């Protein structure tokens, strides 16, 4: 029996970033014993970022010694731009391997020991020794691919002024069409924190018009709720702006369909990611479905396991099964 690996995990308060880190930690726990210390960094902001950069360039080690003492760490992990410098500062007092689940960008890319980067990010240094390309972000993956055939889920995103236009009329038509064609199924619909009020009103009306539909706002769903629903539902429709939820549904082995949005920029990383998923026949679009393409039901996309195995392969290969 191996001694536990000592891991210090940094969290920036973002649920999406936290899921990526937690996903890898859960996958690692299935392979080897762990002792995990959680560190919540202060609320991200411009002043905090400036202070972190000043501390970094001054080679300060106060974060590691003053706040965390002589904590033993074999591995330091975190996701989100605001975790990178705190992790590197922590390493100065607690030498360990540093891992992140994104492209940290210049000049930090070369400073971090291992970066799990989605291939749609088109990293210039994709062949660098410390870069491991993934099919989308690693997310919590507890699914076995077995679902209730009669249960479906619609996940509705919302406004993001930088990336896309939000079209309520188009979405309404799409949702009602799915409900009409699949009226024999039990549907759960959930909004996101970005969903506009008029869209929420529309979704409430969908639920009122269809006795087989239940609607929840994002505020009404507790932590861990969505993972339970993924595990139940055979079919999942996601608005294309919610790309992280697409990968979460794939991680549970669901059949995934994409509801289109009107992108503001051509060839964005979101569009590249969606194109890859379509080309590799992992998802279908709403337009494909309308013309008779069947929903794709494939194997569980378990990127967290690949990431966990890569960590052990590099530094603790004797812990691999």
Image (spheres, rainbow, N blue to C red):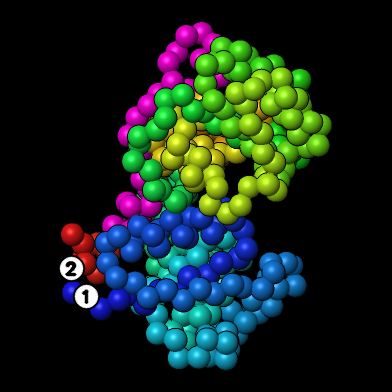
Q: Secondary structure at mark 2?
A: helix
Question: Which residue occupies the extreme right position in the image?
Answer: 198
Q: Which region is colored magenta?
A: 283-311
Cα distance, mark 2 to mark 1?
9 Å
Q: Residue furthest front?
A: 211
Please name whichever residue, 127 or 34, is drawn nearer the observer in this view of the structure: 34
Q: Between residues 56 and 200, which one lies in front from this camera angle?
A: 200
Residue 161, relative to residue 48: is it above or below? Answer: above
**Image quarter in which the C terminus is found:** bottom left
123 or 270: nearer the viewer? 270
* Residue 266 in view, yes or no: no
When asked about the image quadrant of residue 170, the answer is top right
Q: Which residue is mark 2?
A: 318
Of labels 2 and 1, the one closer to you: 1
Name above or below for residue 59 compared with residue 248: below
Residue 308 located within the stretch drawn in magenta: yes
Please name the residue that numbered disc 1 is placed on. Answer: 2
Judged from the image, the secondary structure of the residue bearing numbered disc 1 is loop
**Contact check, label 2 and label 1, Cβ < 8 Å:** yes
Judge whether residue 193 can be spotted in this image: yes
In the image, residue 73 lies at what x, y percent? 40, 80
Q: Residue at position x 60%, y 38% from top? A: 242
Is 144 placed left or right of 42 in the picture? left
């Amino acid at each position: 029996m191996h001694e536990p690996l000592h891991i210090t995990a940094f969290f920036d308060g973002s649920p999406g970033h936290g899921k990526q880190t937690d996903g890898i930690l859960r996958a690692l726990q299935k392979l080897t014993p762990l002792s995990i210390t959680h560190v919540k960094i202060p609320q991200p902001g411009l002043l905090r970022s400036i202070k972190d950069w000043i501390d970094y360039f001054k080679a300060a080690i106060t974060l590691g010694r003053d706040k965390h003492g002589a904590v033993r760490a074999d591995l330091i992990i975190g996701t989100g731009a605001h975790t990178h410098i705190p992790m590197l500062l922590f390493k100065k007092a607690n030498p360990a391997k540093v891992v992140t689940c994104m492209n940290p960008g210049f000049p930090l890319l070369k400073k971090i020991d291992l970066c799990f980067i989605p291939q749609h990010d088109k990293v210039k240094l994709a062949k660098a020794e410390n870069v491991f390309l993934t099919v989308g972000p690693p997310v919590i993956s507890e699914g076995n691919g077995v679902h209730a055939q009669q249960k479906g889920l619609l996940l509705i995103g919302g406004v993001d002024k930088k990336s896309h236009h939000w079209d309520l009329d188009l979405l309404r038509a799409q949702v009602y069409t799915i409900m009409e064609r699949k009226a024999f199924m039990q549907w759960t619909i959930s909004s996101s924190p970005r969903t506009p009020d008029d869209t929420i009103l529309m979704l409430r009306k969908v639920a009122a018009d269809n006795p087989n539909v239940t609607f929840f706002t994002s505020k009404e769903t507790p932590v861990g709720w969505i993972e339970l629903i993924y595990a139940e539902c055979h079919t999942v429709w996601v608005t294309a702006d919610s790309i992280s939820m697409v990968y979460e549904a794939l991680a549970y082995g669901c059949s995934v369909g994409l509801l289109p949005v009107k992108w503001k920029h051509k060839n964005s990383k979101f569009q590249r990611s969606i194109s890859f998923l379509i080309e590799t026949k992992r998802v279908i679009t709403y337009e494909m479905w309308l013309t008779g393409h069947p929903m794709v039901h494939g194997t569980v996309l378990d990127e967290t396991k690949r990431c966990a195995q890569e960590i052990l392969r590099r530094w603790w290969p004797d812990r691999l099964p």
